[in-house]
Amino acid sequence: MWGSYFFYAFPPFSLIGKSLQKVEQDQATGIFIAPLWATQTWFVKLMELLIDQPKAHSMSHYREALRQQGISEQAIEIILSAWRPSTQRQYASSFSRWFLFCREKDCSPFITTIPLILDFLTSLYNAGNGYSNINTARSMLSSFLICPHQIGKNYLIKRFMKGIFELRTPVPRYKTIWDVSIVLDYLRLLGETNTLPLKLLTYKVVTLIALISAQRCQTLGLLNLNSMEKKSDMFIFYLSDKVKQSRPGNVGLVVYTKFPGNELCAFTALERYLHLTKSLRKDSKLFISFVRPHASVSRETISRWIKYVLKESGLNTDLFKPHSTRSAATSGAFVRGVPVEDILQTAGWSNELSFVRFYQKPITDLKDNKFVESILTS
């Protein structure tokens, strides 16, 4: 008798129907794993037996939605690859809410109408969700639902989202951003590059590269010696792995240029770092731990390193996170006269809107001073 236990069931597809009959017969409670396959005869029974919000795994909901439109399995696999894992996770949460909403309304989660979508978005608003979460749900619905109208372009949906924006205007994390000179002054105090121990040199190299490249910690964690080209006056890294800003035509090139005589020259610091770590390396990742066994590090570790430097520089790390180096560098370069085109190319943005909306901030205690050159001479 299953009713005596909190069960876990992951039956073969051919036995899902019989397994659901057993659950119903024994009045059992537990975890039941099954594909999101609305066309199967057992699917209605699965929905009837639910006692909590289902957890959608990966892109199963998109897969079923595409099946409902008559798309072949091979084409579905290719289409699903367009969504990166981070987007899949974000959409899966919104879909679980949509799925439960449709179950309560006794309607299909794959074929819908504009009024029903508005009711769902309103339920999210009433639950206390802000503009960002509701907009993510709208985007999720636009991505896969079968609807007589284009959801994202429907005038009622657009007016609804405008109303949400006015009622719960998203507040940016930063209203102002720190001057890079604050952190650079701290890096100068560490001492000469050629005399620094590995730990301090690591902090210096990571922070300098984060600033002069305006890249995310994710990108820094992907830098690889196998994809590095060293010239007399620059290091060039080609990114073979995809990052958030990767797109067709963008090969992900990161360049660190030499500035002779500058104590904050990232080229010199990186050259020294490669020399000290040569005998310690166990793989080809650029950044390795400064403690044994000197394994390659994750982007989370790189983020902690940058956070340490920001804190030691006197910045409030409860407010300014490691990712703020991206805003500080690009905002500083913009105010000092670097053309927007150069900023976009360096940071990897495809258009000016991303920079203006999310990264361009007023700088506190700004000193006078073009991208890498202006930052390093602050």
Image (cartoon, grey):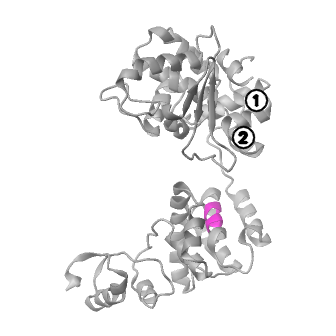
How crowded pointer 2 is (Cα within 10 Å; few <14, some 14-19, many 20+) is rated as many
Residue 334 image label: 1
Mark 1 secondary-structure assignment: helix
Residue visible at 32% across and 79% down?
A: 11
Q: What is the x, y in percent for residue 111?
A: 63, 82
Mark 2 secondary-structure assignment: helix
The secondary structure that dominates the magenta segment is helix
- Foreground of the two, 275 or 102: 275
Between the residue at mark 1 and the residue at mark 2, the CA separation in whole angstroms equals 10 Å
Residue visible at 47% across and 88% down?
A: 40
Label 2, on which residue?
Answer: 355
Quadrant assignment for the C terminus: top right
Q: Is residue 309 above or below residue 166?
A: above
Residue 50 falls within the magenta-colored stretch: no
Q: Is residue 257 above or below residue 143?
A: above
Q: Which residues are magenta?
A: 135-140
- Foreground of the two, 60 or 95: 60
- Foreground of the two, 9 or 220: 220
Q: What is the x, y in percent for residue 248?
A: 68, 50
Determine whether, in the image, residue 313 is placed left or right of residue 162.
left
**Can residue 175 be seen in this snapshot?**
no
Determine whether, in the image, residue 334 is placed left or right of residue 145.
right
Residue 137 falls within the magenta-colored stretch: yes
Three-letter code, disc 1: Phe
Three-letter code, disc 2: Phe
- Foreground of the two, 115 or 322: 322
Q: Is residue 1 above or below residue 329?
A: below
Determine whether, in the image, residue 6 is placed left or right of residue 197.
left
Quadrant assignment for the N terminus: bottom left
- Whether pointer 1 and pointer 2 mark residues with C-beta atoms closer than 8 Å, the reply is yes
Q: What is the x, y in percent for residue 176?
A: 67, 33
**Can residue 327 be seen in this snapshot?**
yes
